[in-house]
């Protein structure tokens, strides 16, 4: 599938489409069943190397990605449930409701995860706020389709309809996209920057926006943990800009005669 926006941006990385399907694409990369891992390196390989990645309910990587990909939520079920994750996302052992139980869970993990569990990721100021984020703030979906697929937009065929589109862009390209979105949407706050995991910034939060009559884009890769995992593939100045399919089509239409035809864009490349 060709894109006017992509042709104008000339990004160094592939623009990525998210699709849901009951058919598994051949030759796709996929996490191992039951293996605890970050899925953002899989996204990075799609963007940087043009691969296709696929995930299902046995290969979603980690608890955050289960929610991010639309396979439900594991926060209440895995690794001690909400009590563990509430402390993990805040101040670690210091925030734990049952410190002895929490410490026992931490001691039974690998060294890298143990360190994070004991110190806490500190994304939330308190156990209570972390619990509210998991149970109230984060949009959770459990789609009926078996697979979630990430593939380069250029490889999307005419009989496929993506759920959303993800641009991997530098600050100049991001500026153009935010300008483009602002040119067609009423009001302000055309792009949201929600707290959460990087996979949720290309998944769950975008799924939520797709339900709106006036959907917004979601700025992503604002997750320090994911940054470490993709650092060997994506440069530090690359952010994701994810848009629901409906918004992508509107942006494509405006791109024909919009900001990319403006001297303010063209002057950047003279």
Image: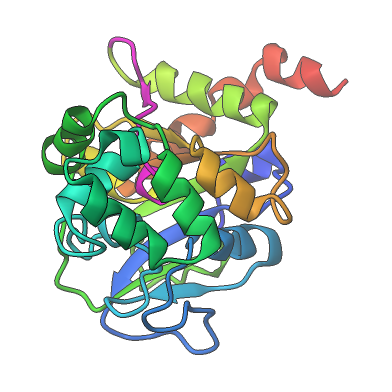
Q: Is residue 81 magenta?
A: no
Residue 217 spot, x, y in % from top left: 38, 33
On screen, residue 260 above or below 134: above
Residue 120 spot, x, y in % from top left: 40, 40
On screen, residue 127 above or below 159: above
Q: Nearer the viewer, residue 64 or 42?
A: 64
Q: Is residue 167 left or right of residue 59?
A: right
Q: Is residue 195 magenta?
A: yes
Image point (17%, 41%), residue name:
97
Image point (17%, 35%), residue name:
212
Name the quadrant of the C terminus. Answer: top right
Residue 174 spot, x, y in % from top left: 59, 28
Q: Nearer the viewer, residue 59 or 154?
A: 59
On screen, residue 95 above or below 37: above
Residue 199 spot, x, y in % from top left: 41, 51
Q: Is residue 265 visible?
A: yes
Q: Nearer the viewer, residue 165 or 2?
A: 165
Q: What range is drawn magenta here?
A: 187-201
Q: Is residue 46 left or right of residue 107?
A: right
Image point (24%, 41%), residue name:
96
Magenta stretch, main secondary structure, is loop
Q: Is residue 202 left or right of residue 74?
A: right
On screen, residue 226 above or below 124: below
Residue at the extreme front of the image, as rendered: 100
Image point (33%, 41%), residue name:
93
């Amino acid at each position: 599938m060709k894109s006017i926006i992509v042709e104008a941006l000339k990004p160094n990385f592939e623009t990525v489409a998210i699709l849901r399907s009951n058919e598994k694409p051949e030759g796709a990369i996929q996490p191992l069943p039951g293996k605890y891992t970050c899925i953002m390196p899989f996204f990075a390989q799609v963007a940087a190397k043009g691969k296709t990645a696929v995930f299902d309910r046995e290969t979603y990587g980690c608890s955050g990605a289960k929610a991010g990909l639309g396979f439900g939520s594991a926060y209440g079920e895995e690794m001690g449930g909400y009590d563990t994750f509430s402390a993990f996302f805040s101040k670690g052992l210091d925030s734990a409701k049952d410190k002895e139980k929490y410490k026992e869970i931490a001691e039974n993990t690998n060294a890298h995860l143990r360190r994070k569990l004991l110190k806490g990721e500190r994304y939330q100021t308190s156990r209570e706020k972390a619990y509210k984020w998991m149970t109230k703030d984060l949009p959770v979906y459990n789609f009926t389709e078996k697979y979630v697929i990430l593939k380069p937009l250029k490889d999307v065929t005419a009989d496929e309809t993506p759920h959303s589109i993800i641009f991997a862009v530098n600050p100049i390209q991001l500026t153009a996209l935010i300008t483009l979105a602002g040119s067609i949407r009423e009001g302000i706050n055309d792009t949201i920057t929600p707290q959460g995991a990087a996979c949720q910034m290309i998944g769950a939060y975008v799924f939520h926006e797709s339900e709106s009559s006036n959907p917004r884009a979601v700025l992503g890769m604002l997750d320090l943990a994911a940054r470490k995992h993709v650092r060997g593939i994506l440069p530090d100045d690359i952010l994701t800009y994810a848009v629901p399919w409906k918004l992508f089509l509107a942006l494509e239409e405006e791109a024909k005669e919009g900001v990319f035809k403006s001297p303010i864009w063209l002057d950047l490349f003279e």
